[in-house]
Image: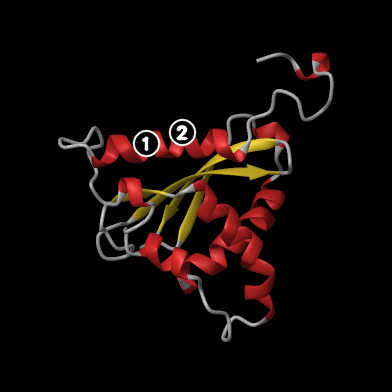
Amino acid sequence: MTPRLDWPSFDNGWLKDFHMGAAMTMFRNRFIRDPSQYPNPRIAFLDQDMLSSLLKDYNQFALSRRNFLFRAMYLEHFNGTAPVDSQTNKKWHIHVDHLYACFFVNQNHWVALDIDLPAKTIYVYVSIPSLVKDSDLVKECIALRRMIPAL
């Protein structure tokens, strides 16, 4: 990757949602193979489009949590029937204990998430800790922390 100082503009060279979406698709496809390359069968990899939609819908969710209706897409992910090309048919909380995702924070850094459903905890793995403050990570993850249990 070209050092940031050599980019023609700030946005050049940076990984986008579709790059991470491709990586998550690869992880999902490896997971659904028989035999799976993963020792733990109680995991799921979040779809990048679903994660982006969840974050966009958070403002509406926060305004009226009781009146918020989750779209069918969210329920399909919850039930393991989406994405269509890599269905697991494993329901969160019943067959899945951990959700894995890539998450863009502070508009300049990707982190890895391990969402532990039974413990109701989000573990954040940061490759360069000096780029993101813990308090910022808490703010960035608030939508996931509130919407995933409600789903």
**Image spot of residue 85 (x, y percent):** 33, 46
State whether residue 123 is above or below residue 97: above
State whether residue 42 is above or below residue 59: above
Looking at the picture, tell me which residue is in the foreground, 3 or 34.
34
Q: Quadrant of residue 75?
A: bottom left
Disc 1 marks which residue?
27
Few, some or many residues within 10 Å of mark 2 (<14, 14–19, 20+)? some
Taking the spot 50% from the left edge, 71% from the top edge, the residue there is 71
Few, some or many residues within 10 Å of mark 1 (<14, 14–19, 20+)? some
Disc 2 marks which residue?
23
**Image spot of residue 149 (x, y percent):** 46, 69
**Image spot of residue 128 (x, y percent):** 64, 29
Q: Is residue 47 left or right of residue 89?
A: right
Q: Which residue is outermost to the front?
A: 84
Taking the spot 63% from the left edge, 66% from the top edge, the residue there is 57
Q: Is residue 43 left or right of residue 116?
A: left
Checking the image for residue 76, the label placed there is none
| Callout 1 touching callout 2 (CB < 8 Å) | yes
